Image (cartoon, helix red, strand yellow):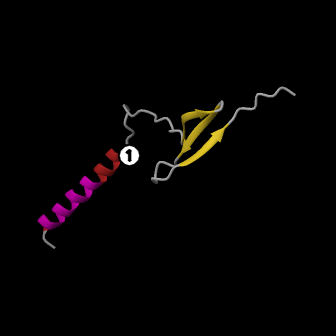
Amino acid sequence: MNKSVILKIAVIVIGIIFLLFYMMIPNQSAKVLEPKSNFEVIDTYKGCELLRWNNHQLAEYKYFLYCKDTKND
């Protein structure tokens, strides 16, 4: 092989290695993301909360009626 071809390959390999190391350095300004809730209160019905649920990856919604137990035994 020609010396110039070997030199070009070496420069490319070294560049890729530096790029990989650069990508592994954590970003200091990155913010910690809060997990999103899958439930949302959308209405009330007779003192109960109507909840809508989805998994944020599908266009599928399920609805639940949540009533807090107010009985004191």
Instruction: Report the residue that reaches farthest toward the top.
Output: 72
Residue 62 drawn above or below residue 41: below
Where residue 2 sits: x, y (%)? 13, 70
Q: Quadrant of the C terminus?
A: top right
- Residue 7, by quadrant, is bottom left
Instruction: Report the residue that reaches farthest toward the front.
Output: 46
What residue lies at 39% left-to-right and 34% top-to-bottom?
Answer: 30
What residue lies at 66% left-to-right and 38% top-to-bottom?
Answer: 66
Residue range corresponding to the magenta coloring: 4-16
Toward the viewer: 24 or 39?
39
Q: How many labels does the image show?
A: 1
Q: Is residue 11 magenta?
A: yes
Residue 55 drawn above or below residue 30: below
Q: Mark 1 points at which residue?
A: 24
What residue lies at 14% left-to-right and 67% top-to-bottom?
Answer: 5
Where residue 61 sits: x, y (%)? 51, 49
Q: Quadrant of the N terminus?
A: bottom left
Q: What element carries label 1?
A: helix
Q: Is residue 14 magenta?
A: yes
- Horizontal side of 60 relative to 47 (left or right) equals left
Q: Could you tell me the amino acid type at mark 1? A: Met
